Image (tube, grey):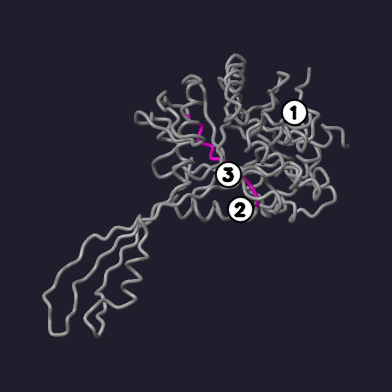
Amino acid sequence: MPPPTIAEPFSKRADNPDVPPLTSYLLQLISIKKSNLCVSADVHTSSALLRVAEDVGDYICVLKTHADIIDDFSDQTIKRLKEVSRRKNFLLFEDRKLGDIGSALYSIRGRGAARLTGLNPGTVQAQYTRGPLAIAKWAHITNAHIFPGPAIITSLQSAANETLFSLNQSVSTEISTGTPRHSFDGSANGDEVAMAAALEPSSHTIGMIPSPQDPFGRKGSIVTATTTISQTFEPGPPSPGLYRSLSSGEGDAGDKELALQELGPPPHARGLLLLAQMSSEGHMLNEAYTSACVDAARKHTDFVLGFIAQRALNEGSNDAFLTLTPGVNLPPEGARGAWNTSDGMGQQWRTPKEVVGKDGADIVIVGRGILNAKDRPKEAERYRRAAWAAYEERIGRR
């Protein structure tokens, strides 16, 4: 029996109230851009990463990164990458393949707030949230193996919640110093009195430095520190109906740019993909392992978006997971006859028609086929068209 989602349009799947907000957002984004293409930016410098993002951003729904192989990865890289992702409307997926142990620690504190307390985080939580990569602070999506056990999912989810909570708060301190001006009658002038009266409760006068009275009657200096704690929240997922009036379901006749504006930025959320299958020859992820991934995902549908897999794994009636499939390639444009379906080092390539049309994957992941092209935007558009055509054929639109 085919997976229940195989013939269902992305726009309809976005309406499912049981999928995480990030899944709903991504499905709507795919529908508007008419792109189920993810490009794998396997490059080694920040400038190369940003160039890829600029080249292909208009044609993709997701950019997959390997931050740990970028020699000069920094906060500035993150800042600029996030700016490109917002401007060109795609999500960021850090392909970290987490697989270490966590700690089953955290408890929720505060009504409606995912504030986590407890022991120090385990290794996998630290890999996700700390160090020079600090993945959870900027990547909407990451992925993980479950060979340490399904507890890795709860460990990463608790770490994601903690990070999102901390990102919602900022603390700033302003310190000012000066000598009060003196009036002709020997009292503080009106400006000084007004300033003192206007101090907020959160402000704290550290102290006044006394000085001897001189012939001009000058006072000591005042040092004031003002600490401001503010909270900001990214918007949640938009109403599914917002973009439909513009996109006519999936971008058929509407104004795409206006639809993207209506969709807005991604929700303040993080999501996880489980590595259930691989595209390399001789991999060790057997059917029992794949089944264990699906079982674990079903217990965490609020955080697990889906799978890295070679085929759709939505076999249960309530399954609504996404499938992202690597190892996708097209023959050179204009080529006829046989073409190379392997790189000679274990990678097995298939076409979008096989991956999306036959095996029910949702998003194709393409690396070298686009990265090594002389004209990346043109090649990204060629892959986008092929993957979208395979999807439309699958759901009966062609």
> Magenta part mainly helix, strand or loop?
strand
Quarter of image, res 314 = top right
In the figure, is residue 100 to the left or right of 13? left
Give the total number of marks visible in the rendering: 3
- Region in magenta: 89-98
Q: Nearer the viewer, residue 207 or 91?
A: 207
In percent of the image, x 34 and y 76: which residue is there?
A: 191
Q: Amino acid at mark 1?
A: Gly
* Quadrant location, the C terminus: top right
What is the distance, in whole Å, between disc 1 and disc 2 at their CAs? Answer: 29 Å
In the figure, is residue 269 to the left or right of 163? right
Quarter of image, res 353 = top right
Q: Position of residue 200 (x, y in %)?
A: 37, 59
The correct choice, above or below, for 309 with respect to 10 in the image is above
Q: Amino acid at mark 3?
A: Leu
- Classify 10 Å Cα crowding around label 3: few (below 14), some (14-19), many (20 and above): many
Q: Amino acid at mark 2?
A: Arg
In the figure, is residue 304 to the left or right of 392? left
Which badge, 2 or 3, is on the more N-terminal residue? 2
Residue beneath disc 3: 92
Residue 160 appears in the rendering? no
Checking the image for residue 350, the label placed there is none
Q: Nearer the viewer, residue 170 or 258?
A: 170
Which badge, 1 or 2, is on the more N-terminal residue? 2
